Amino acid sequence: MIQVTAAIVRDEKGRIMICQRPEGKSCALLWEFPGGKQEEGETLEECLARECREELSVDLRVGELYGSVEHDYGTFSVNVHFFLCQIASGSVVRKEHKEILWVSPSELKDYPFCPADAEIIKNLSREPSKSR
């Protein structure tokens, strides 16, 4: 099972960052939270910070674990660990994704997400928009 991290990044208005996967990769053009695969020897928090530096050019303040979801895609299985995060420094630069948006929790249901994110989306979309 592949260990994967995902950042639930909120801005000052309580909106959440979502990223559209690029064409040519698994789950092409579906939406996801930024993050990626854990490498050997790194913690989940280190993985998430590294992935967001590489893909978005930002340093994250990785907070508490929001939840974990296991999903079988048929040819591979993932255990995705979702963390509540804030941008500590840097400005978001789109390097890997087709598009990056900031949406309210209630708008999450309007975007087609990768299947592993479905349960988390349900929980987040019920939350009121709020500043953190």
Image: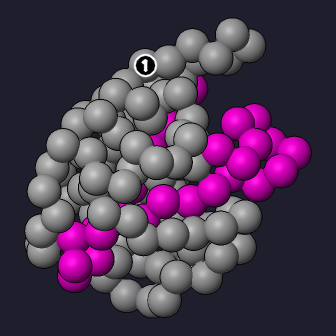
- On the rendered image, what quadrant is the C terminus found in? bottom left
The residue at the far bottom in this view is: 90
Q: Quadrant of residue 89?
A: bottom left
Q: In x, y percent, where is residue 23?
A: 83, 50
- Counting from the top left corner in percent of width and height, residue 121 is at 35, 39
Q: In the figure, 110 relative to 89: above or below?
A: above
Counting from the top left corner in percent of width and height, residue 50 is at 51, 63
Residue in the picture at 49% in, 28% down = 116
On screen, residue 21 above or below 9: above
Tell me, yes or no, if residue 104 can be seen here.
yes
Q: Residue at x 72, y 64 (%)?
A: 98
The residue depicted at 42 percent of the width and 77 percent of the height is 59
For the record, the magenta segment spans 2-30
Q: Which residue is mark 1?
A: 70
Q: State the quadrant of the N terminus.
A: top right
Between 33 and 46, the one nearer to me in the picture:
33
- The residue that appears at 31% across and 63% down in the rendered structure is 104
